[in-house]
Structures are given as C-alpha cells and as structure tokens.
Amino acid sequence: MEEIPDTLANMVVIFLADWAKKDGGLPISVVIVGVNPLVEIAKRSMNGAMPISSMLCWQKAYTTVMTKKDTIFWADWQAKGKCIDNFCDPNFTAFPGAKVIYDPEEPKKVLGAIGVSGRNGRKETTDKLLQDHELAGLGARYLEELLAAHQKKTGSLKSKKQHKSKRAQSFQKN
C-alpha cells in the first residue's frame, strides 16, 4: 500500500471521537498523518476539546512518523532522564498518545501515524476510561484492519499503480 486512503482515515477519526463521546471522558482531538507528517489525512476535534489538543495530537503524530516510534517510547525515554530537546526539533513531543500505522502487506513499512490528545497520556491502574495512548492504539488497530480489508477487496494499491504504469507505457508506445 502506498498511502492511507482518506476515506478510511476519516472513518477512524469519527470512530474515535464517537468512542470518546460515549465513554463520557474528556473531549479529544485526533489526527492521522501519512509518511509526510505535515499533511493531515484526517482530523477531528470534539466539541469542548481544549484548543491545544488539536496542535498536540498533530505533534504526537509528527514525532511518531519522524522517529518511527510510538510516543510512549519517548515518554519512557524522557522519564529516564534523557531529553527529547536534543533532537532540536520544536515539533517533537514526549507526550504519549500516538501510534505508528503499518502497512498490512509489509508489516515493517510505516504508512503514517495516528495522534490523540485531550486526556491523560496513558491509562493508570485507577483509570476506568481509555486515555490518549490507548485511544491511539485502538484507532491504529482499527485502521490497520480497515487497510487489510481494503487491500483484500481492491487488491494492493501498489499493484494498481504498477498496472496503471504498464497501461501508460503501452499507450506511449502506440
């Protein structure tokens, strides 16, 4: 798969916003970015979400794509006394709440990331509701299932692109 289809990304951000609304916790902002984290494929902020949540969910997704590591890694890394500021990137954040989105056909290939912000970074033993990290994980799993079903139904986007390329080559020959 070459990229995350926007229709599937929109389904996931709506799904997570609905989940958060139904569980009665704090409102959230959700974003899905591709391998270029400057491009937001889908984004949604619930009514009542803190304005900063919109920026933080993007920063979480940005950090995840740029480093190919979930932000929980950076939160734990910083908790050990290491400093994320050493990367000299003002968009990096060590707040938990973003997960890598992998290609179902090539499990090590990163397609993008999902970032969630608005609640606590991660679920503690006393929490009854999902927090940013867990919501991002739920969204990532749902998107990866949708991507796998999409690929099964339509065939690989890669093979379609190759097919179009062959058609273009035969057209150019004629």
Image (spheres, rainbow, N blue to C red):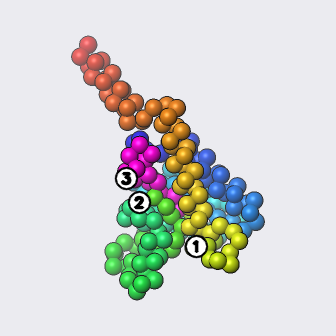
Q: Looking at the image, which residue is at 51% across and 74% down?
A: 95
Label 1 belongs to which residue? 122
Distance (Cα) linking label 1 and label 2: 19 Å
The residue range painted magenta reads 101-115
Dot 2 amino acid type:
Val
Q: Looking at this view, is 82 or 52 the one in front?
A: 82
Rendered image: mark on residue 15? none
Label 2 belongs to which residue? 65
Q: Is residue 48 magenta?
A: no
Q: Looking at the image, which residue is at 43% across and 57% down?
A: 37
Whole-percent x, y for residue 164 in the image: 36, 26
Label 2 Cα crowd, 10 Å radius (few <14 / some 14-19 / many 20+)? many
Distance (Cα) linking label 3 and label 2: 13 Å
Lower position in the chain sequence, tag 3 or tag 1: 3
Numbered disc in front, either 3 or 2: 3
Which quarter of the figure is the N terminus placed in?
A: top left
Label 1 Cα crowd, 10 Å radius (few <14 / some 14-19 / many 20+)? some
Q: Looking at this view, is 153 or 85 the one in front?
A: 153
Dot 1 amino acid type:
Arg
Dot 3 amino acid type:
Lys
Whole-percent x, y for residue 74 in the image: 43, 74
Lower position in the chain sequence, tag 3 or tag 2: 2
Q: Looking at the image, which residue is at 61% across and 73% down?
A: 123
Depicted 93 relative to depicted 15: above or below: below
In this rendering, does residue 141 appear at all? yes
**Element assignment for label 1:** loop
Specify whether 12 is left or right of 107: right
Whole-percent x, y for residue 12 in the image: 60, 50
